[in-house]
């Protein structure tokens, strides 16, 4: 927004003026400072219409439509998008066509026009095929998942939800990568300025030493004073550089809200742990859990209350585990615990302990009274192997079985513990080689 304001202060015209207005409106929109009746919208539309810039004009319409959807006005969003869709389509500009179709799919879904919603969602995905990770793809898969769920087609809903989760992760990873790259660039620029400043001070020191050579006593006093100043400066910049590195490390490795590992750093640690356990023939188990109906808490009590729940759940689960367990927030309300040297039975007991501890959380400190529950899925390397993707996928499948069975429970992947108990009681059905989903109540 700052640079677009500078650009608009220049004597620009034509396409440049249209682009400048569009960038200003996009900045306001993403900063949640744009309102549907803002006079800058009409100014931007006029600048683009006068220069026949259909793509930029369509971008502005997409911001207005998104504002209507945020205000739960789907019909107004549909009107503005449909009335400008044909003009945009004539440009064959894939990105904004995907944006329009994803917004239309969301708007039609809110009006219960599921067939139109599904049609636009699929079209948005088709347009997004060759333009990389993007928000329209995330929105389209989310709408398709919701449509399938509303129709009772749980198998298709699960498939679309998986695609939505993958697209959402890829899109968020891209954003995080860009943010980290920007922060690193800032750090390097600061470091470069520090080096230049230090070189300038060293040059000044040489000049001063030449002048002070005429008087030995004065030279000693000034040299000591300058030496102290340089040491202090080096200590200051060294400390500042160390603090910057620590801050970048914190941002790169830990989840800012809960303080546990983020998804990216969890993946690195988990790969190392899996390789070590496989080479050393050591037990390794994986617990995946997701808070039940967390969106309802956010909607009913606000996002501040939701943040309190995430932090409180993290605290109670950390108390139950060991210091060397790899505990991470994978995204949203989903968490994972990787346990080295821990067999399936012990991991299942830990999952049950965490589940009960979560259910016993007193929520009055949040400013509201409600119940928190979570659904757990458990597996180990003997069941799922030492591949991280397979291990978490099996735990995720068990977790979804917990949700399917009524939530607030722990499920072991493949019913492994149920089969083991049956073998010990002489009740095995001879099918221990099959993967079967089972739940366990301790």
Image (cartoon, helix red, strand yellow):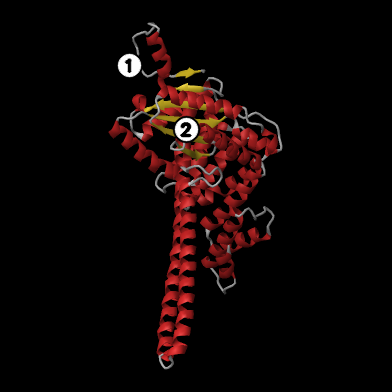
Q: Residue furthest left?
A: 279
Residue at the spot of label 1 = 433
Asked where in the image residue 115 lies, by quadrant, the reply is: top right
Q: Residue furthest bottom?
A: 214
User: Secondary structure under badge 2?
Assistant: helix
Find residue 160 and name its label. 2
Residue 62 place in picture, x, y as percent: 57, 50
> Which of the pair 410/67 is nearer the observer?
410
Which image quadrant is residue 21 in? bottom right
* Residue 217 relative to residue 298: left or right: left
Residue nearest the viewer, comparing 413 with 218: 218
Which residue is the extreme one toward the front? 217
Q: Residue at x 44, y 87 (%)?
A: 219
Name the quadrant of the N terminus: bottom right
SS at mark 1? loop
Label 2 neighbour load within 10 Å: few <14, some 14-19, many 20+: many
Left or right, 286 with respect to 408, comes to left
Spot occupied by residue 342 in the image (x, y as percentages of width and height): 40, 28
Task: Measure the alpha-carbon separation of dots 2 and 1.
Answer: 30 Å
Q: Please tell me whether mark 2 or mark 1 is closer to you in this view.
A: 1
* Residue 324: % across, % down: 43, 37
């Amino acid at each position: 927004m700052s640079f677009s304001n500078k650009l608009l202060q220049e004597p620009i015209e034509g396409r440049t003026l249209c682009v400048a207005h569009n960038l200003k409106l996009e900045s306001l929109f993403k900063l949640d400072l744009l309102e549907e009746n803002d006079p800058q919208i009409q100014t931007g539309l006029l600048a683009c219409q006068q220069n026949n810039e259909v793509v930029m004009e369509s971008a502005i319409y997409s911001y207005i439509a998104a504002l209507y959807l945020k205000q739960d006005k789907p019909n107004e969003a549909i009107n503005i998008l449909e009335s400008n869709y044909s003009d945009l389509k004539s440009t064959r500009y894939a990105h904004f066509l995907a944006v329009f179709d994803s917004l239309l799919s969301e708007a039609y879904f809110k009006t219960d026009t599921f067939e139109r919603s599904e049609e636009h969602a699929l079209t948005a995905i088709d347009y997004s095929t060759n333009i990389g990770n993007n928000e329209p793809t995330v929105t389209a898969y989310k709408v398709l998942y919701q449509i399938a769920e509303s129709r009772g087609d749980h198998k298709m809903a699960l498939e679309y939800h998986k695609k939505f989760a993958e697209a959402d992760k890829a899109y968020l990873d891209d954003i995080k990568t860009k943010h980290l790259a920007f922060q690193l660039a800032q750090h390097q620029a600061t470091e470069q300025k520090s080096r230049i400043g230090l070189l300038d001070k060293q040059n000044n020191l040489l000049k001063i030493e030449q002048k002070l050579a005429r008087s030995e006593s004065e030279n000693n006093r000034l040299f000591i004073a300058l030496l102290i100043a340089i040491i202090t400066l080096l200590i200051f910049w060294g400390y500042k550089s160390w603090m910057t590195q620590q801050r970048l490390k914190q941002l790169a490795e830990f989840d800012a809200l809960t303080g546990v590992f983020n998804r990216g750093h969890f993946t690195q640690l988990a790969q190392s742990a899996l390789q070590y356990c496989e080479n050393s023939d050591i037990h390794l188990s994986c617990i995946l859990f997701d808070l039940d109906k967390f969106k309802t808490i956010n909607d009913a009590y606000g996002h501040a209350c939701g943040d309190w729940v995430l932090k409180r759940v993290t605290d109670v689960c950390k108390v139950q585990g060991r210091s060397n367990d790899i505990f991470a927030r994978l995204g949203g309300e989903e968490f994972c615990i990787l346990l080295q040297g821990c067999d399936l039975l012990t991991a299942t007991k830990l999952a049950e302990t965490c589940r009960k501890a979560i259910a016993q959380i007193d929520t009055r400190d949040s400013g509201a009274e409600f119940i928190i529950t979570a659904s757990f899925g458990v597996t180990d390397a003997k069941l799922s192997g030492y591949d991280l993707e397979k291990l978490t996928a099996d735990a995720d499948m068990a977790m979804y079985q917990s949700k399917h069975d009524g939530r607030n429970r722990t499920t072991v992947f493949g019913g492994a513990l149920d089969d083991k108990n049956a073998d010990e009681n002489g009740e095995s059905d001879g099918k221990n080689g099959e993967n079967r989903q089972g739940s366990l109540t301790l």
